[in-house]
Image (tube, grey):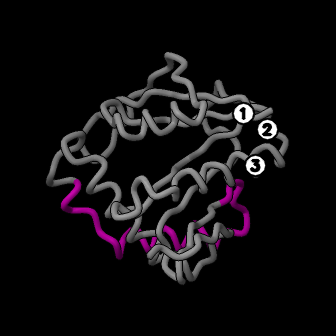
Amino acid sequence: MRHALQIRAAAVDDAHGIAVVHVTSWQTAYRGLMPDDVLDGLSIEQREEGWRRILDDSHATGRTIVADRDGAIVGWASFGPGRDAEASGQGELWGLYARPDEFSTGVGHALISAAETALRQGGFTSAYLWVLDGNDRAATFYERLGWIEDGAVKLDERQGMTLLERRRTKLLV
């Protein structure tokens, strides 16, 4: 039996749980879309260190929320002002991930609903996000919730690979 889900602001002490979700969700969701050696080489410890820095940054412009079930982090979302030059005045969902055993359980829906509400309360009337090309599960999830692909694409160069991402947008009013 699954217990109640709590959506709350992330704290520095959540860094390990967020890192576990980050790494395991990437290893599951991006298998076949990224090289196996890149996915297999992801480090929970390195991600945890990065998340500690992010969550401890008093000058951060964005927010991170977590989905907590019985004291365990089962998902997270980060969002804030758009980071792309052409996105001035728009909000951005920077990332949203759930633990693989929590896929299709409502965790993602609860997180995105809370993120949309927070962006709206922050004065944003529209927002965007990027989806890795070929990530059909995510594309379908976002489409179902009103995030529409708008035709914009970008190439993300990282760890010796080039990833194609597709933008989705949503009016928040």
Is 22 situated left or right of 173 in this image? left
Is 29 situated left or right of 13 in this image? left
Q: Which residues are magenta?
A: 39-63
Q: Return the x and y of residue 21 as percentages of the image width and height.
A: 41, 66
Disc 1 crowd, CA 10 A, few/some/many (<14, 14-19, 20+): many
Vertical side of 172 occupied by 73: above or below: below
CA–CA distance between discs 2 and 1? Answer: 6 Å
Residue 40: say if magenta.
yes
Q: Quadrant of the N terminus?
A: bottom left
Q: Amino acid at mark 3?
A: Thr
Would you name the residue on which mark 2 appears? 124
Q: Amino acid at mark 2?
A: Phe
Would you name the residue on which mark 3 appears? 117
CA–CA distance between discs 2 and 3? Answer: 10 Å
Q: Return the x and y of residue 7 as percentages of the image width and height.
A: 64, 67
Are the residues flagged by discs 2 and 1 in contact, CB closer than 8 Å? yes
